[in-house]
């Protein structure tokens, strides 16, 4: 795909298309190529990791010789927060794409944010295969809750789990009333996710509620006024009839040993591990600043539309908007389709500006395509599932887009107020007098002619070009400036022109000496 994109870019640069269209399409192709190569590099890196471990990539020869169980390892390490949500979402979606049979959570965490914990629980529920947790050293607080909603919990010999009482993000204890509400809510959530597992709900409640006393078969496992903590050995102790482990499903010295046991005797498991590559880290950062990228991109496009030709502002604005797609695409939230829809909208808008000014149909359809593409690109769409439009999908995208528009309007107001007084703006809008005079020919405004919305520039009026018309720019007529478009070709600054038609937003002009 990369070769085809580069070949098309070379043909584009050698074509006879207008310079403006060549510039914009070349920039779009370069960014699309970078997205494609970065995702390909990440996938190649994941396969290299698998091969280095003595395993076969998902599409390698071993996968075709005999069916082998596929595992995808997702790390949950350190404090749980939004970065952890990002990792789990990305990892689970990659597991779905790889048609994995198991998602293995490699857990070593003291706990973390409640909101992030609930998001992770919902993400894990979307995986149709088996989700297991391997508690390497500890699964405290939020980690215990997340482990509690997986199919099975395995332990390293020194692994511990428990102490999941809700606390504030500052680390302080919550009030007794709020604590009861949060504990009841979490208990209900865990109960819903752990249905069918005999002791799971009771054990997790004992980890969350200090007032809950856990007694099984006459054995007091936890008394009141304390939180339950279990070692690997205690989690594997059997209760009931028939006897079943209290919480654990097994103890294994290493994660690789667990995967080998799950794969079965004689099987060659295919293992992939989530890797935090440079592109994934960049995507995580770009997602955080999506509203800022949208705002800056909108402001730069506004400046481009207010200046003649097409240059650095237009290309920079489009690249900033496409970076929003890059972040969400690499993060696993969207595919290439939203970006292609956005690019189609961009092309339609410039078709309107270059070839059919005033028609509005292309501009309206293009703007709608761009907005829909942006919303779709920021929505959380899962692979392998039927695409269903739900309001919940677009809450965060709509918030980001609204905030981006708000920032764009604010930045545009600042630019419109400050930049016209600067030397920087003078590079794009000629403020000094231009050679030539502006006048209206006798009889130019005849009976039945309606006045221009801009005021005074009727069909037949004669003026002078202020900024080059490529084919859009500015002209001066009777001491006032107007947006204008050359009827045919381009007209340089300083040349006299005559108005031949009035559009809704621009004047259509031709050289006065034509």
Image: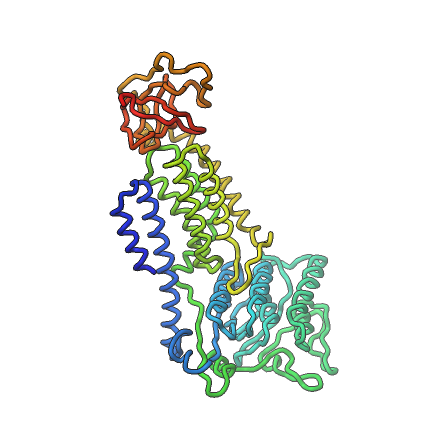
Residue drawn at the location 48% of the way across and 36% of the way down: 410
Q: Is residue 242 left or right of residue 233?
A: right
Q: Nearer the viewer, residue 131 or 199?
A: 131
Q: In this view, does 199 lie above or below 489?
A: below
Q: Which of 431 and 419 is in front in this view?
A: 431
Task: For the N terminus, give its image quadrant.
Answer: bottom left
Say if residue 500 shows up in the picture. yes
Q: Is residue 391 left or right of residue 509?
A: right
The residue sitting at the top extreme is 442
The residue sitting at the right extreme is 218
Counting from the top left corner in percent of width and height, residue 375 is at: 51, 49
Counting from the top left corner in percent of width and height, residue 53 is at: 39, 77
Counting from the top left corner in percent of width and height, residue 507 is at: 39, 26
Counting from the top left corner in percent of width and height, residue 250 is at: 56, 82
Q: Is residue 227 above or below residue 470?
A: below
Say if residue 77 shows up in the picture. no
The residue sitting at the left extreme is 14
Task: For the C terminus, give its image quadrant.
Answer: top left
Q: In this view, does 250 lie above or below 379?
A: below
């Amino acid at each position: 795909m990369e070769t085809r994109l580069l070949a098309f870019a070379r043909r584009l640069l050698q074509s006879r298309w207008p310079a403006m269209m060549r510039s914009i399409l070349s920039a779009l192709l370069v960014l699309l190529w970078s997205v494609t190569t970065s995702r390909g590099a990440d996938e190649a890196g994941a396969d290299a990791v698998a091969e280095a471990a003595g395993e076969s990539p998902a599409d390698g020869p071993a996968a075709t010789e005999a069916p082998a169980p596929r595992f995808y390892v997702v790390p949950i390490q350190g404090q749980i927060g939004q970065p952890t949500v990002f990792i789990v979402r990305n990892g689970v979606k990659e597991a779905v794409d790889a048609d994995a049979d198991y998602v293995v959570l490699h857990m070593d965490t003291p706990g973390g944010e409640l909101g992030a914990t609930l998001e992770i629980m919902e993400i894990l529920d979307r995986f149709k295969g088996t989700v297991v947790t391997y508690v390497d050293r500890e699964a405290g607080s939020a980690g215990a809750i997340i482990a509690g909603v997986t199919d099975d919990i395995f332990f390293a010999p020194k692994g511990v789990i428990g102490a999941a009482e809700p606390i504030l993000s500052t680390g302080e204890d919550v009030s007794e009333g709020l604590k009861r509400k949060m504990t009841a809510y979490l208990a209900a959530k865990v109960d819903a996710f752990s249905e069918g597992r005999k002791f799971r709900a009771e054990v997790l409640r004992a980890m969350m509620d200090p007032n809950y006393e856990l007694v099984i078969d006459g054995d007091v496992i936890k008394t009141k006024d304390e939180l339950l903590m279990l070692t690997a050995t205690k989690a594997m102790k059997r209760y009931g009839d028939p006897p079943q482990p209290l919480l654990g499903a097994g103890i294994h010295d290493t994660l690789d040993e667990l995967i080998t046991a799950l794969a079965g005797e004689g099987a060659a498991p295919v293992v992939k591990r989530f890797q935090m590559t440079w592109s994934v880290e960049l995507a995580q950062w770009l997602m955080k600043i999506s509203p800022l990228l949208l705002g800056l991109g909108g402001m730069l496009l506004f400046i481009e539309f207010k200046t003649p030709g097409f240059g650095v502002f237009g290309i920079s604005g489009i690249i900033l908007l496409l970076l929003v797609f890059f972040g969400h695409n690499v993060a696993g939230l969207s595919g290439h389709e939203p970006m292609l829809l956005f690019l189609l909208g961009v092309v339609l808008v410039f078709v309107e500006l270059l070839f059919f000014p005033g028609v509005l149909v292309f501009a309206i359809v293009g703007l709608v395509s761009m907005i829909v593409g942006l919303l779709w690109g920021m929505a959380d769409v899962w692979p392998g599932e039927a695409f269903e439009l739900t309001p919940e999908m677009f809450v965060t995208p709509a918030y980001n887009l609204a905030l981006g528009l708000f920032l764009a309007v604010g930045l545009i107001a600042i630019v419109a107020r400050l930049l016209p007084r600067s030397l920087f703006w003078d590079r794009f809008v000629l403020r000094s007098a231009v050679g030539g005079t502006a006048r209206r020919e006798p009889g130019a405004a005849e009976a039945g002619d309606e006045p221009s919305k801009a005021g005074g520039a009727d069909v037949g009026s004669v003026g002078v070009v202020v900024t080059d018309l490529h084919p859009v720019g500015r002209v001066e007529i009777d001491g006032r400036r107007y947006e204008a478009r050359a009827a045919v070709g381009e007209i340089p600054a300083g040349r006299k022109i005559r108005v031949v038609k009035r559009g809704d937003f621009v004047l259509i002009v031709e050289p006065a000496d034509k």
